[in-house]
Amino acid sequence: MASYQIEWVGTGSGLNPVLGNTAFIIRGSGDRQLLVDCGATVPTAILKSGAIVGITDYLITHAHGDHFHGLEAAGFYNYFALGRRGDRRPNLFFAGSGVAAAVATALEASMGLIVNDTGEDLPVSLSEYFNIITTDRIQIPGLPEIRCVGRKHVGSLENFGLEIEGGVFYSGDTVEVPPAEPNLIFQDCQFFDGGPGDVHISFSRLCREVPAAVKARTHLVHVGGGWDKVDTQAEGFAGIVKPGDRFEISLEETPAAPVAT
Ligand SMILES: [Zn+2]
């Protein structure tokens, strides 16, 4: 795999009716495609575009509805409309067992009962719809390797950002500033300062605490109220990502300079 592509499905917060819930698809050289996060607005978007058919793998960063409630519609669509059952189920990755347990409990309340071919009740678990894999290191053939890293969001809630091969960082939901090293950063951001109880980092804090060189590599996502009233590029950032935006990431390494002997 010489390169891969990130396509944004949504780039808003849980309450952004214009940009939709933050989620993106990673496509590489093979048949597998990974959807990262799947809030309630995401199934409509990927059904409209047709992208849902190509998605073989799902990854959920934490157990908030704007990051996983769409798994119900996606799971039903794969199971009933596409007939992807048994060995053909999509994979569903969780970076931690706490996220996996919380999501399964929430979804099984509404997905836990179907009927069999003769119309009788058939209680099922979430693993009827998805092949569930809990790991903090995701290796999918044809896609970049992903390492899931804990990030502070709501108190002690289990929550992850993603370090994606090729120098890409996705913050997930967080109150933390992004690391300085990645070449391409997708950073959660809110446009108000609520105080110590904030669960997303504010734009004003990012302006103060992120070095200029890092701002230039930082694209803002998961944006809510006020996102359309601030010129983030004037403050040195790469801007706000929009649904449909695509980023091509090269994995070609620059050949090392020959060493004189
Ligand atoms: Zn959240």
Image (spheres, grey):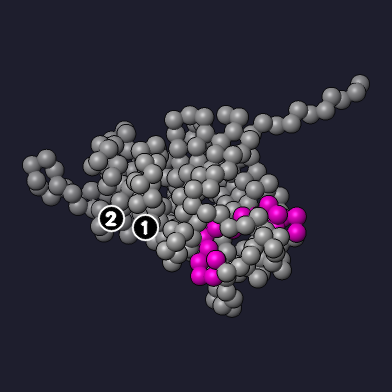
First of labels 2, 1 by sequence position: 1
Residue found at x 46% / y 41%: 34
Amino acid residing under circle 2 = Glu
In this picture, residue 76 sits left or right of residue 244: left
Which is more toward the observer, 101 or 252?
Answer: 252
Residue found at x 31% / y 33%: 87
Residue found at x 45% / y 37%: 33
Q: Is residue 158 visible?
A: no
Task: Tell me the quarter of the image containing the C terminus.
Answer: top right
- Residue 178 covered by magenta stretch: no
Task: Tell me the quarter of the image containing the N terminus.
Answer: top right
Residue 116: name its quadrant: top left
Q: Determine whether 103 is above or below 28 in the image.
A: below
Residue at the spot of label 1: 40
Which residue extends farthest right? 261
Q: Position of residue 81 (x, y in %)?
A: 25, 41
Mark 1 near ligand 1 (CB under 8 Å)?
no
Amino acid residing under circle 1 = Ala
Do labels 2 and 1 touch, CB within 8 Å?
Answer: no
Q: Which label number is shown at residue 77?
A: none
Q: Determine whether 70 is above or below 231 in the image.
A: above
Residue at the spot of label 2: 108
Which is more toward the observer, 189 or 243?
Answer: 243
Residue found at x 84% / y 24%: 258
Q: Position of residue 198 (x, y in %)?
A: 55, 73
Q: Determine whether 67 is above or below 145 in the image.
A: below
In the image, the segment drawn in magenta is 212-228
- Residue 220 covered by magenta stretch: yes
Residue 249: name its quadrant: top right
